[in-house]
Structure formats: structure tokens, C-alpha cells
Image (cartoon, grey):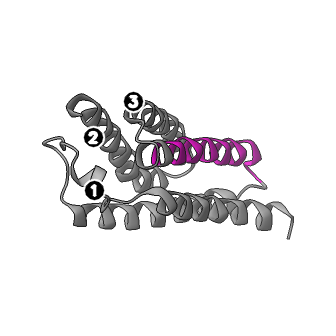
Amino acid sequence: MTWTRVVLPAVSVLLVAVYAIGSGRWVTTSADWYTNLSQPAWQPPPPVFGLAWSYNFLALIVVGLVITLQAQTQTSRTVAYLALFAVSIAFALAWAYLFYVPHELVASAAFLTLCALTTVGMVVLAFADRWWLGALLLPYQAWLVIAASLSWGYVRLN
């Protein structure tokens, strides 16, 4: 067993953990400032967020593991996927921090848009590997596009 079959899958799972823990650190929808914001008309009800993120994190783990476990034969594609994933997580965490901590709505919307755009590359690489991996990431991609549009909706309304 080579190091790629151990290290790269571990990196993939670690990235998902950083994403989940990092966003959980800052995201809070119970704060007064958030509940007083005017919400876009297309804002989903709160239970949808929990279901969507449960699916998203599970899909990211599955896709990341499948892609990284075959790194010996497709090292450049694997590294490209992990690099895009890491960059997209950085953008997503920047959004979470900027939106929920200093309440910088424009900057946070810009970072979430960058996250959604970066994730397109992940979806393309997943489809190039196996069609079903790409299909697993499509709901995540759609969720990010919706979230970015919501973020810009908050900018417009507040």
C-alpha cells in the first residue's frame, strides 16, 4: 500500500471535517441580527438546511474517498480535485465568518459566489472520473448556487 492510498483519502476526510467544524463555529441563525434581516422570498425553511448539509457532507466524503483511493492511477486529477476542494472550503469558511461575525454582507456574498464557481471544477472532475460521482455532487453545486443567490438577496434587501 502506497502513501497515496492512505494520505490522500485522509486529507479528503479532513477537509470535510474542517468544512463542517469551521462553518459550524460561525453559522448561527438564532442571533437577533440574523432574525431581524429581511429574507429573500426564495429562502428555504430551516429544516431544509439541515437536510441539505447532511447530504452535502456525506456526498463530499463519498466522492472524495472514491477519487482519492485511486490516486495511484490518476494522481494529477486527484490533486486537482483536492486543491479545488480546499480552495472552495476556504471561500465557504470566509463566507461563514464574514456573514455571521462582522456581518459583511457584500464580501460574504462574493466569497460564496467564488465557492460556487470553484465547485464547478470539482463537479467536472468527478464526472470525468465516474458519472455517478458527478451526479452525487450536483445537489451540492445547486445548493451553493442557491446559497449564493440568497446571500446576494440579503445584500439587496438589507
Q: Which residue is mark 3?
A: 106
Q: Quadrant of residue 104?
A: top left
Q: Is residue 107 above or below residue 57?
A: above
- Work out whether residue 127 can be spotted: no
Q: Dot 1, how many residues are within 10 Å of its Cα: few (below 14), some (14-19), or many (20+)?
A: few
Task: Give the residue drawn at x 39%, y 30%.
Answer: 106
| Residue type beneath disc 3 | Val
- Sequence-wise first label, 1 or 2: 1
Question: What kind of secondary structure does the magenta stretch mostly adopt?
Answer: helix
Whether residue 97 is in magenta: the answer is no
Q: Which residue is mark 1?
A: 32
Give 69 or 148, whichever is nearer the viewer: 148
Q: Which residues are magenta?
A: 73-96
Point out residue 123 in the picture as x, y percentages from the top left corner. 48, 43
Whether residue 86 is in magenta: the answer is yes
Q: Dot 3, how many residues are within 10 Å of its Cα: few (below 14), some (14-19), or many (20+)?
A: some
Point out residue 81 in the picture as x, y percentages from the top left corner. 63, 45
Q: Decide: marks 3, 2 in contact (CB < 8 A)?
A: no
Task: Give the residue drawn at x 72%, y 46%.
Answer: 79
Q: Decide: marks 1, 2 in contact (CB < 8 A)?
A: no
- Sequence-wise first label, 3 or 2: 3
**Element marked by disc 1:** helix
**Element marked by disc 3:** helix
Point out the frontmost of discs 1 and 2.
1
* Image side of residue 2 versus residue 73, left or right: right
